[in-house]
Each structure stands twice: as C-alpha cells, then as structure tokens.
Image (tube, grey):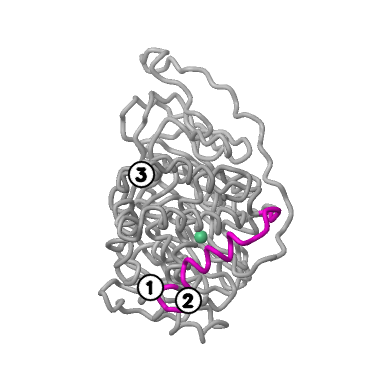
Amino acid sequence: MRYNQRGVALVAALVGILACAPADEPSPANGHQVSDHRAGAPGIGDTDFPKDGNGGYDVGHYAIAIDYTPAGRRLVGVTTVTATATQGLSSFNLDLAGFDVSAVTVNNAPATFSRNGDELTVRPARPVDNGARFTVKVSYSGVPTPRSGTTLGTYGFIPTPDGAFVAAEPNGAKTWFPANDHPADKAPFDFTITVPAGVTALANGEMVGQPTTAGGKTTYRWRERYPMATYLATATLGKFDLRQGRTPGGIPNLAATDPRFRSALDGLYTTSGTLTDHWATVFGPYPFGSTGGVVDDFAAGYALENQTKPLYGGFHPGENIIAHELAHQWFGNSLSITRWKDLWLNEGFATYAEWLWAEHKGTRTAEAAFRELHNRPATAPIWKYPPGRARPDDLFNQSVYSRGAATLHALRKAVGDQTFFALLKKWAADHRYGHVTTDQFIELAEQMSGKELSALFDAWLFQPRRPA
Ligand SMILES: [Zn+2]
C-alpha cells in the first residue's frame, strides 16, 4: 500500500489484543484416538498479530459468493473454504468480524460453531484427520463493519453510496468473508458477486463468462487462479467506467474509474500497461493473468496493491504511485511475507521501484533519492525506527518504505548494478507465488555477490540510528 499524501489524518482506535480463545478438549468421537485430534490454534503464529490467521490447516481454495445491496448496506454471503488439515482437528477456527452466522457445514455435514471476537470456532460432526482435505461452508449475513486503526486508516469492506471500496491490508478480509486471515496462507479465489443491475463488481483476476442479469440483479464471476493473500482480495462495487485491452507486451489490462474520476481513466489504463511491461523487464515475467487498476471515490487517501487490480482511494493516481502498486505484484503479492515484521520486503521494494522509475525516466537518480534520505539529520525519526522489524502498532511507518528502499540502494552500491539487478530477478523467480523472509533475502544477496553483507543489513534494517 502507499499513502497518497503525508500527514493524512487517521481515525484513532487502537487495534486491541483480545482475550484468548475458548479452551478446547480433544474429542473421542467416532472411534478416533483422543490424542489424534485437537483444537487448531486460534492464530497462525505471528507473534505481532497473535489472533490473525489460524493453525491446524492450510487453505487450498476460497469460493466466495456474496449478494450486496448498497441501499441497505446488507451483505448475504456463502463462503466455501477448501483446506488440508496439518494436524488432526477436533475443531478449528476461521477469522470473521461481525455478521450473523446462520449455518456452518464441514464436508456437507452440519457442524456446531461458536463466536468469540473475530474468531469463529467450528467443531465438525466428525473430526478431521491430519492430512485430510476438507471443505467448510459458512453462511452469513449482516452489515459489514470496516476497521480502523491509529496508523492504518479505514480498511476492509467499506460501504460507499454506490457500492463498496474493498482494501483489506493488513487484516480486514475478515470484514467480508471467513478466512485464514494472514498472508502466511495463500490460495486461489473464485468470486460470485450479485449486485443491483447497473452496479459493476470488480474482483481479482479475470472475469469468468459474462455477467448475467435476472430480477433486477446482476451476477459477476471472477477468478484469481494464482495464490493470493487474503488482504489482497477485493470486490470493489459501484458505478464504473471501464477501459479494457492489453498492454503493449500483451498482458490483459483493465482500468476502471468512478464517474467522478472519469478523467483519470485513459491515463490509468496507459500508465498501468506501460509499467506492467516495464517491471517485467526489470523483475522478470509478470506473475499474474492480468493487470490494471481501479479508482474509486472513497477518500481513503491511500492505494492498495490488490492482486491484479490495485485500488486507488479517492484521488487521481500519478505515475509514481502506479509504479509502486504494480511493483507490489512481484514483491508482496507473488512473493508474500510470512510475518508482518518483514513488511519492508514489500514496501521497501515497492518504494525502491518508485526510485527506479524516476531514474528510468531521467527525472531523478536512485542515488539522488538515497542521498536526500541519508542526509536527514541523525535525530530524524526515520533513524529511530528500524525498518527490518515493522512494528504492529506502526506497521506502515515511513521508515519501512523509505529506509527499506535505501537498504536496497546501499546493497546495490555494495554489490554493483549487474549483481543487484540479477538478484532482484532471481529473488522474484525463486519464490514466485511463495513466501519469503528477510533472512532468505540476505542469504541470496550474499550468495550471489560472494560478499559478507551482515553489517550492511544490520545497520540499515535493524539499528535504531542513522547508518554511517
Ligand atoms: Zn506499498
């Protein structure tokens, strides 16, 4: 993501750490041994966000069907999650915020369930064996409640007068579908979205067939066939002008703008196409089936790199922010972080992409951007915040972006352009559609350069002071 301007006033409400999930006992039902099945953990293991995601299974696919009425802000949903158990499960959790849950089935059999905060605990009629593939179907309805945090702004499924603005980083997917809501578990998605006729539904990936209209409602089907983190899923709804085609390099390209931003449509389409093709020459082949962007009139003040369809919230996007969001398709979307503290692997790279784009255009070299940052006084706040450990209470701090980008430039100067740009491509290729950590990046940089780089990374990523 990236803020459009500095100093945007953000809504204040700390994201609290909730009390623990209910205790659970192994179930002796159905002749399984007691020790074989136990409750899945209520968190995926990210110590900074202990309740995000869940343990005990790995999601293989999401099928999300929603019917949304902007006038009443009412969402009726049926989400089917297909997963593989990574332990014997007597029960397991999904993350879901708000809504009334009317039914849950596991492998088509009714399951019992309970709610505690954002944790939906599901107890299947028969325990799930370790290694078994299973489907859990959740039926739910209600008025979506977006989230807000001191440093995060408003995010999640955000109702707008004509539809919804859906941007969910870091953990707002649960505001519209039950999920293993953490980037450490990615899966392909199918979306079936029903809206009043005249409203356009824009989800990730590509449209499947043509929209169908019956009884005053239109149903859109979208499919993202590549693995996607839950926070990158979108169903942005409203009145949109569209421009579709292909980038000069041949990648399907879809730009959409709210009527208030109609003047941005052609620029968004053309620049998104140019940048997608350009980054493919720098970072390696584009990882997904389509590209583009959406400008909605919700004044979020930020953009989010929703997979295949970055979303720009209430402003006319310029080249730099488009360069940033499209670079995320490689760094953040194809390569995903395992823990939020490694967020510089997304934001430092996307910010460095802005520097590279300016360098490519001849407006400012990356070295000039680096010097401007490094020349800030030793007392500047950016030096107190080590970007290699993004803080849960200040995740999107400027240090994660700019000092993260400066880390890459310091690395480039240390290893030389040839090794540096080969490293970017190999990093993107080796971990395509997978997960990454900072340690893996340092290891690859040392391996490809033959240099010992721990002092460089330590100074730039982990010390609360200005690097020498
Ligand atoms: Zn970003």
In the picture, residue 84 is in which quadrant? Answer: top left
SS type, badge 3: loop
Question: Relative to 207, does residue 246 appear above or below in the rendering?
Answer: below
Q: Residue 306 in the image: x percent, y percent?
A: 46, 61
The stretch in magenta equals 359-381
- Tell me the tag on residue 275: 1
Q: CA distance from mark 2 to mark 3?
A: 35 Å
- Tell me the tag on residue 451: 3
Q: Nearer the viewer, residue 82 or 351?
A: 351
Q: Is mark 2 within 8 Å of ligand 1?
A: no
In the picture, residue 203 is in which quadrant? Answer: bottom left
Mark 3: which amino acid? Answer: Lys
Residue at (50% x, 66% y) in the render? 236
Q: Residue 459 in the image: x percent, y percent?
A: 54, 45
- Tell me the tag on residue 319: 2
Residue farthest to the right, as pictured: 12
Q: Nearer the viewer, mark 2 or mark 3?
A: 3
**Circles 2 and 1: CB distance less than 8 Å?**
yes
Question: Relative to 160, does residue 421 appear above or below in the rendering?
Answer: above
Residue at (51% x, 69% y) in the render? 368
